Image (tube, rainbow, N blue to C red):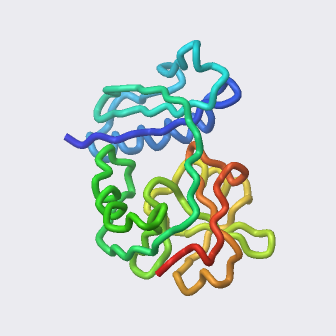
Amino acid sequence: MFRFIETICYEQRRFHRIELHNERLNRTRTHFFGKLPEIRLELLLSVPAVLINETVKCTVTYGIEISDIEYTVYTVRQIKSLKLVPDNAIDYAFKYADRSIFKTMLQNNLQYDDILIVKNGLLTDISYANTIYLRENTWYSQRNPLLFGTRLHSYVREGRVTPALLTPADLIRFSEVRIINAMISIENSPVIPIEAVFN
């Protein structure tokens, strides 16, 4: 049976973007298992008292029902280099718990900090985050990422990031790359110079 995950950021004593996580979780369940009673994550999540003042990564594993909830203190991993890796067959439109495809790609490119997957000629995501690109004070994202993350969704809706169709040839138009996901914002993302994205 398929299993999926939601990664939810707990920071400043609250869970962030919970409605977007609810929406994706229930949309995924409906797609794979048919119409089911809706799950409301805010009714189920409770950070342990010893972690209430920390930045916490909450990982919810689920299928038809939720099977596990984990809480871990989170620190942003520093990324200084990316390797472009083509893969036209990869499909990660849903947040699967099985991430073996990414592990294989990373193991094949150990001299780089992470991989930047190119699908059908378009830049997409690294192994665990969406990517955004800076040009003249404007942030751009791939219009068709592998997975449309909740923070990217929020940024696009707020007008902080502009979606576009981006190819590897477009990289020279930008000054830097940053990564964003549920746990990583524009502000706390590592800054990756364009020169550190390798073919």
Residue 13 in which image quadrant: top right
Residue 67 in which image quadrant: top left
Which of the image's four quarters has the N terminus?
top left
* Residue at the far left in the pictured view: 1
* Residue at the far bottom in the pictured view: 169
Q: Residue at x 42, y 67 (%)?
A: 111
How many marks the image carries: the answer is: 0
User: Viewer-proximal residue, 133 or 31?
Assistant: 133
Q: Residue at x 60, y 49 (%)?
A: 151
What x and y, as percent, mark residue 191?
A: 67, 61
User: Measured along the vertical axis of the image, is residue 103 above or below residue 40?
Assistant: below
Q: Residue at x 63, y 35 (%)?
A: 16
User: Measured along the vertical axis of the image, is residue 34 above or below residue 36?
Assistant: below
What x and y, as percent, mark residue 65?
A: 31, 28
Q: Residue at x 50, y 22 (%)?
A: 45
* Residue at the far front in the pictured view: 111
What x and y, as percent, mark residue 18?
A: 57, 34
User: Viewer-proximal residue, 147 or 134?
Assistant: 134
* Residue at the far top in the pictured view: 49
What x and y, as percent, mark residue 17?
A: 61, 38
Position of 174 with respect to 81 (left or right) is right
